[in-house]
Image (cartoon, rainbow, N blue to C red):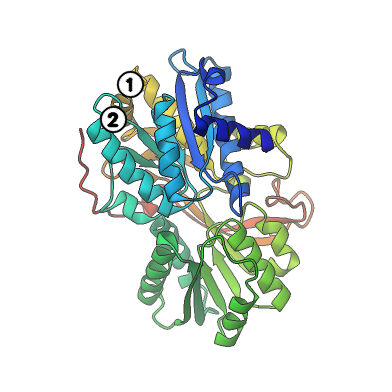
Amino acid sequence: MKTRLLTAALLAAGSLASPFAAAQVRVAYIDPLSGFMGATGERGLKELEFAAELINAKGGVLGQKIEILPMDNKLSAQESLILLKSAIDKGARYIAQGNGSSVAAALIDAVNKHNERNPGKEVVFLNYAAVDPEFTNDKCSFWHFRFDANSDMKLEALTTYMKGQSKIKKVYLFNQDYSFGHQVAKSARAMLNAKRPDVQIVGDELHPLARVKDFAPYIAKIIASGADSVVTGNWGSDLALLVKAAKDAGLKADFYTFYAGVIGTPPALGDAGVERVKVVSIWNANAASPAAQAMFDAYKKKHNALDDPYSQSARYSIEMLAKAMTAAKSTEPVKVARALENLKHEGPWGEVTMRDSDHQLIQPIFVGTFVKADPPGKYKYTADGVTGFAFREEAKFPAAATAPATTCKMRRP
């Protein structure tokens, strides 16, 4: 970790050029590698590097190696813009980011401006986890490609599942105070009102992103509201600390989450989360294809038997980048971006497609429940960081059912 941060710092300072002299396709990874969300960023970096290593082991792409350049943005949009300039100065024509839609929004705007001012030196943004729907709607960009499902796609699946849960009577919306959290609260309210008008929204609260150390006061409000269910888009330490506080306070409500499957949350849940915590996700290891499970096994063998990949979307982004370069017979961003449009790829549950109209990856989505991994052997893969718990699949939505309408009016060069 220290070595990686030192490398990132030296890169940002412009004093470490020679180690990357041999790299020909450089992908700058601009995400948090320190602070509250550092563990989340580290997990994404591992997955990107894993994908690049597999491609490089087979000779790279068009005879060139893929190099991932880690850059610690400390979850700051301002810091990310400085790192973007540094990455471009070092020859990176591709950037990857996923943590924080506020950061992604700043990068999309900066990449658009750079490309307009510097024809022939364009940059493409590979977004593997920033899920604000606006990025593939009114704020869409030819230079931006999203490999995760956006929050509205996930909420569509989650609220469709909730529609059939008759025990849900009172829902509390609890989210992070930035663009993604605002969107989750807004869309969850609208979708629940449409699908379950009998459900009462008894709370709608936002909290500062990555700044709360003790969620007990918030949990007290949720208990006082009488909520039987909580919908939250929280991620990273904001989710792990939230569920820990709920466990400590004895909150009996069910949690409907986006990211309960990764980065410290399953250990924080323990017995208190069994049959109460739901997750909506684009992947489920236990239901994946044999080929996807082999990839999953290889990742765990390299890193840690209890570490899950952060998201399959990080791996997709590099695999599909290489595939597009091969199809375009070029590593030039304009040609590669065009080749990415409508590109199909084999996902863990079947085919996924990068939609050309808005650059949103269309893919299957599932809803799962946190359960005990009993009897032993019932679940091949347990949840991240634990051996006694897993996620049971409750519902699966095929790719065609998750494809949303878009307001994007794509401007192509």
Residue at 48% across / 66% down in the picture? 161
Circle 2: element type:
helix
Check disc 1 and give the amino acid type.
Answer: Ala
Sort mark 1 into few (<14), some (14-19) or many (20+) by Cα contacts within 10 Å. Answer: some
The disc label shown at residue 328, or none: 1
Work out whether 67 lies above or below 351. above
Residue at 66% across / 58% down in the picture? 265
Q: Which residue is mark 2?
A: 338
Residue at 32% across / 55% down in the picture? 134
Is residue 126 found left or right of 17 in the rendered image?
A: left
Mark-to-mark CA distance, 2 and 1: 8 Å
Quadrant where the N terminus is found in the figure: top right
Residue at 30% across / 26% down in the picture? 121
Seen from the viewer's position, the closer of residues 151 and 275 is: 151
Is residue 222 found left or right of 111 in the rendered image?
A: right
Quadrant where the C terminus is found in the figure: top left
Sort mark 2 into few (<14), some (14-19) or many (20+) by Cα contacts within 10 Å. Answer: some
Residue 2: % across, % down: 68, 37
